Amino acid sequence: MEKETRNPLATAAKGQLFSCYQMLETLVDVCPDEIWQNVYGEVPFWYQVYHTAYFVDYWLREDRAGAGFPCVRFDPRIPPEFEWIPQEDVSISRETMRVYLLLIRQKLRRIFATLADSDLSRSAFDLEPEVTLLDAIFSQARHIMYNVGYCNGILRVRDLPESDWYAYNEPIE
């Protein structure tokens, strides 16, 4: 992959975020259905993934007015915050989650396609003027990794495949 030199900071931020995002997508692929639907610490596995994806979708928007959110509307009984656990009769399938993650990835590609280093210091979007775009990118990379690590732990203690470490822009097979 040819290294972008015109906007090296935006390119580095993109690489870090997309490396984390790849691990989230892989987590959905490797998680068995019985684990996907199970509850751990009062939180369904699928909900941990949804919560993570939702906030990437929330914080990284295509314009300063805040358009481009949400990519997908789900059942209104599924809140994004952990303070309200969803009812047992609602869930999001792995296939639906894959589509949601793909739509977010496409949005992220559009955002980063025109992102200049100077854009990183602007506000993430008008409703959150104190948070810079770089803050949002960094916090979402950390948020993804926290939740992938938690979910990997659930898989690991059951001797199941997990989302392997994706360090930085390796080719996806």
Image (tube, rainbow, N blue to C red):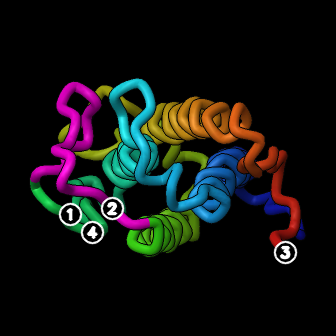
Give the magenta part as a residue range.
77-93
Which of discs 2 and 1 lies nearer the camera? The answer is: 2
Residue 60 visible somewhere in the drawing: no
Residue sitting at x 66%, y 41%: 155
Q: Quadrant of the N terminus?
A: bottom right
Give whichever of 122, 146 is nearer the camera.
Answer: 146
Alpha carbon distance from label 3 to label 1: 30 Å
Neighbours of disc 1 within 10 Å: few (<14), some (14-19), many (20+): few
Mark closest to the chain's N terminus, 3 or 1: 1
Q: Are marks 1 and 4 in contact (CB under 8 Å)?
A: yes
Q: Which residue is mark 4?
A: 72
Which of discs 2 and 3 lies nearer the camera? The answer is: 2
As drawn, is 15 to the left or to the right of 27? right
Q: Which residue is mark 1?
A: 74
Above or below: residue 134 compared with residue 116? above
Neighbours of disc 3 within 10 Å: few (<14), some (14-19), many (20+): few
Alpha carbon distance from label 2 to label 1: 8 Å
Q: Position of residue 49 (x, y in %)?
A: 45, 48
Q: Which residue is mark 2?
A: 92
Q: Are marks 4 and 3 in contact (CB under 8 Å)?
A: no
Residue sitting at x 50%, y 31%: 139
Q: Position of residue 96 (x, y in %)?
A: 39, 72
Mark closest to the chain's N terminus, 2 or 3: 2
Alpha carbon distance from label 2 to label 3: 26 Å
Q: Name the amino acid, label 2.
A: Ile
Asked whether residue 134 is drawn in magenta, I would say: no
Q: Name the amino acid, label 3.
A: Glu
Which of discs 2 and 4 lies nearer the camera? The answer is: 2
Give whichever of 105, 94 is nearer the camera.
Answer: 94
Alpha carbon distance from label 1 to label 4: 6 Å
